[in-house]
Amino acid sequence: MNAEERRRRMVELARRAGSVEVPTLAAELAVSKETVRRDLGVLEEHGLVRRTHGGAYPVESAGYETTLDVRRTQHVPQKSRIAAAAVDLLDGAETVFVDEGFTPRLIAEALPRDRDLTVVTASLGVASVLADRDRTSVLLLGGQVRGGTMATIGHWAVRMLSTFVIDLAYVGANGISREHGLTTPDPVVGELKAQIVRSARRRVFAGVHTKFGSVSFSRFAEVADFGAIVTDTGLSASEAARYAYLGPQVIRV
């Protein structure tokens, strides 16, 4: 196996598992840990992975996006804390949008049961979490269902969403950067998210630290479009301050 084949295999393993560790790759590929680290450095330079302490995780792009099943296994304690902190920002909102994804689903689960809420979502998972609540009315956007995320997309969903004025939107993204804003691999998904940003009076981005600095294909919002960013302490205080300088309150939990 030459270096190109080895690196291609590393990317495949990272995408399949959601993340990889240096010792595991070294054993799998029968090479030294130093070779793995060097290969991961090359892959990071090409924008295919991002390195962590002891390993790496795949970077989402126009041609690759992690599935909901993979997201359910990654950074779960951090995502639970982020969801709880995001719900603390609900204040007096009566109409709420909850995006697709695992962290938004945790937000949906954490929404209060003791008050009247109308929740708009494109996510079948979010809708199923909230459907049996007595004081929560759920509006599921129509459209084509994406199998990987179990969420609706397309012009039907965008058109329906464009008729609403929403008090608060909890929005996710595949990447967020100070230079390129919030991005997602699929332009059709980006169109729906852009409409969310236009339809909501307040917007909160909720996502783990690994999304920061990542850039995907389709940009749908600027950092300044958000009143708050909720993430975990894996985002350094200094980097959080740089995002806060652009306008939003940055909450690290």
Image: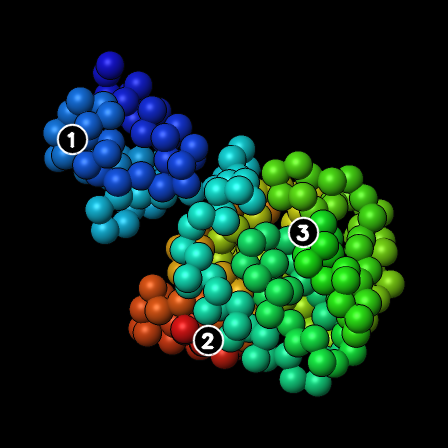
How many numbered marks appear?
Answer: 3
Query: Does dot 3 land on a helix, a strand or a loop?
Result: helix
- Disc 2 marks which amino acid? Val
In the depicted structure, whether residue 101 falls above or below residue 35: below
Specify the quadrant of the image occupied by residue 118: bottom right
The residues tagged by marks 3 and 2 sit, at their Cα atoms, a distance apart of: 27 Å
- Which is nearer the N-term, disc 2 or disc 1? 1
Specify the quadrant of the image occupied by residue 47: top left
Asked if the residue at tag 1 contacts the one at tag 2, i.e. Cβ–Cβ closer than 8 Å, the answer is no
Residue located beneath label 3 in the image: 125
The residues tagged by marks 3 and 1 sit, at their Cα atoms, a distance apart of: 41 Å
The residues tagged by marks 2 and 1 sit, at their Cα atoms, a distance apart of: 38 Å
Residue 40 x %, y %: 26, 37
Residue at 46%, 69% in the rendered image: 81
- Disc 3 marks which amino acid? Gly
Residue located beneath label 2 in the image: 250
In the picture, measured across the screen, residue 33 lies left or right of residue 222, that is left
Residue located beneath label 1 in the image: 35
Query: Does dot 2 land on a helix, a strand or a loop?
Result: strand
